[in-house]
Image (spheres, rainbow, N blue to C red):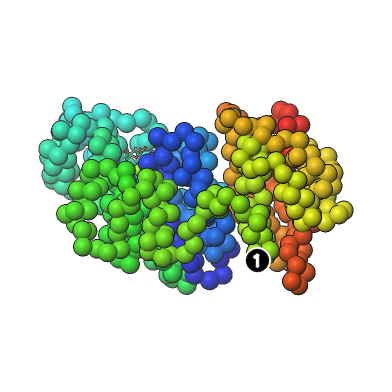
């Protein structure tokens, strides 16, 4: 958050499973579309918040499985754990407020009296969250009875039913909505209240997100019955909440457009972006577009025409150097020549490229340093490189690639780095 010097233009607070992530799409297309849009148009001045029911353990697993961006803030375990930044620094202040009228021992004792409740995995039991599976047909009666019993024992809890199977028991002050309200308050005191906030979700535990004042909301097209029912009963007349026509991240992009929150054309939806180069002298855009081109080139989705590579070479400084993660150096122009040989080598294969945390800084007038993480998924293997690009630009001319340097990301255990091009 420190990187922002003024209030964020947009804060997206999104659920992950079946909202940001479409588990029915093995290609992750809508997520990849969202990713390019975010890095292209929002990363530099906006905040990305993930708000998931998952514990830190299952959240980290999902990150390995899916091409998720790195959020600025991560809210896990149904709003009971808030962390900041890449190193996920916990908000201890938030945790303290959750101890009010909460006693894990009593919750465990009372719930053990209900044979209908099946305890979820150990990783999902957290200091302020106890989770079960319960059959849809029994959920209503069980929740009612259980909440009365816990109240009698002096606790003030919240029971949330999600996805037609999960029952979470949390302190009354917890939940995704309360966590968002807490975050907004915190940002406000820091003078960084977002200009707009968009909450995105699909299931019961997301309902609270849509009742926070002044927040736009999108229920993705594939939203669960329990969320749509909650909406019909509680928020039907709120024009700031829509039920999208598109699934998952596609619905988020749709909502950005409908609420006019900013650009909503993902670079992935533009077929020929090298054409519109001249008008654009934004170094962050340049990098997003280049790696998208790189993916399409290797997938054989762009024509193998000389004009493309010639235009790329023309935008590289003649003596510009690329430092490969192996440490080997060659000129940028030679690197483009090498790329030419790989046209279509990933055709029909599982091959995707995405960039994360693209941040550009103008170091001296006309000189830019862009830092980003570049990821490449090839079959079942995923590799990433921390990448630094230096650009220069002269009045009236486009950006010139001066230098590119890559080092393997910590998560990438690379045995053979010869197959990595850039
Ligand atoms: C995630 C969590 C689970 C929780 C569910 C609904 O799936 O892993 O513990 O019950 O979200 O909030
Ligand atoms: Mg969900």
82 lies above or below 142: below
Whether residue 169 is visible to the viewer of this picture, yes or no, is no
Q: Secondary structure at mark 1?
A: loop
205 lies above or below 263: above
Q: Nearer the viewer, residue 34 or 82?
A: 34
The quadrant where residue 136 appears? top left
Q: Nearer the viewer, residue 235 or 121?
A: 235
Residue drawn 45% across the image and 40% down it: 59
- Residue 138 horizontal/vertical position (percent): 15, 33
Q: Is residue 419 left or right of residue 267?
A: right
Residue drawn 58% across the image and 30% down it: 348
- Residue 76 horizontal/vertical position (percent): 41, 46
- Residue 230 horizontal/vertical position (percent): 21, 51
Q: Is residue 341 left or right of residue 256?
A: right
Point out the residue furthest to the right here. 319
Quadrant that contains the C terminus: top right
Whether residue 166 is visible to the viewer of this picture, yes or no, is yes
Q: Nearer the viewer, residue 287 or 136?
A: 287
374 lies above or below 395: above
Residue drawn 58% across the image and 38% down it: 352
Residue drawn 37% across the image and 31% down it: 122
379 lies above or below 173: above
The quadrant where residue 93 appears? bottom left
Q: Quadrant of ligand 2?
A: top left
- Residue 120 horizontal/vertical position (percent): 32, 31
The quadrant where residue 360 appears? bottom right
Q: To which residue does mark 1 refer?
A: 279
């Amino acid at each position: 958050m420190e990187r922002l010097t003024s209030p964020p233009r947009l804060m997206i607070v999104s659920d992950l499973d079946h909202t940001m992530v479409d588990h029915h799409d093995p290609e992750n297309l809508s997520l990849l579309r969202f990713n390019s849009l975010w890095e292209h148009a929002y990363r530099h001045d906006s905040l990305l918040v993930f708000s998931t029911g998952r514990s830190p353990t299952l959240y980290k697993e999902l990150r390995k499985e899916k091409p998720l961006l790195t959020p600025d803030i991560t809210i896990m375990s149904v709003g009971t754990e808030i962390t900041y930044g890449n190193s996920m620094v916990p908000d201890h202040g938030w945790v303290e407020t959750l101890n009010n009228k909460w006693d894990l021992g009593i919750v465990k004792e009372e719930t053990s009296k209900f044979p209908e409740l099946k305890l979820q995995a150990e990783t999902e039991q957290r200091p302020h969250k106890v989770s079960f599976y319960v059959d849809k047909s029994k959920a209503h009666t069980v929740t009612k009875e259980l909440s009365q019993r816990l109240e009698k024992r002096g606790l003030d809890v919240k029971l949330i039913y999600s996805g037609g199977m999960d029952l979470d028991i949390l302190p009354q002050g917890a939940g995704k909505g309360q966590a968002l309200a807490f975050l907004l308050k915190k940002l406000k005191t820091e003078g960084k209240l977002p200009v707009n906030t968009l909450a995105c979700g699909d299931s019961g535990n997301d309902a609270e997100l849509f009742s926070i004042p002044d927040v736009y909301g999108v229920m993705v097209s594939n939203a669960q019955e329990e969320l749509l029912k909650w909406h019909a009963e509680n928020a039907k007349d709120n024009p700031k909440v829509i039920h999208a026509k598109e699934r998952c991240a596609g619905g988020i992009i749709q909502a950005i457009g409908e609420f006019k929150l900013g650009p909503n054309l993902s670079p992935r939806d533009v077929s020929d972006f090298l054409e519109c180069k001249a008008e654009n002298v934004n170094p962050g855009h340049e990098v997003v577009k280049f790696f998208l081109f790189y993916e399409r080139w290797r997938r054989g989705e762009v024509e193998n025409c000389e004009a493309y590579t010639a235009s790329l070479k023309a935008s590289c400084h003649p003596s510009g150097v690329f430092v490969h993660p192996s440490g080997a150096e060659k000129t940028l122009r030679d690197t483009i020549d090498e790329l030419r040989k790989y046209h279509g080598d990933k055709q029909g294969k599982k091959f995707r490229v995405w960039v994360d945390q693209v941040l550009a800084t103008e170091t001296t007038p006309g000189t830019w340093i862009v830092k980003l993480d570049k990821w490449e998924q090839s079959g079942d293997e995923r590799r990433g490189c921390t990448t630094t690009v230096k650009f220069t630009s002269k009045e009236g001319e486009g950006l010139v690639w001066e230098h590119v340097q890559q080092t393997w990301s910590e998560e990438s255990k690379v045995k053979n780095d010869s197959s990595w091009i850039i």
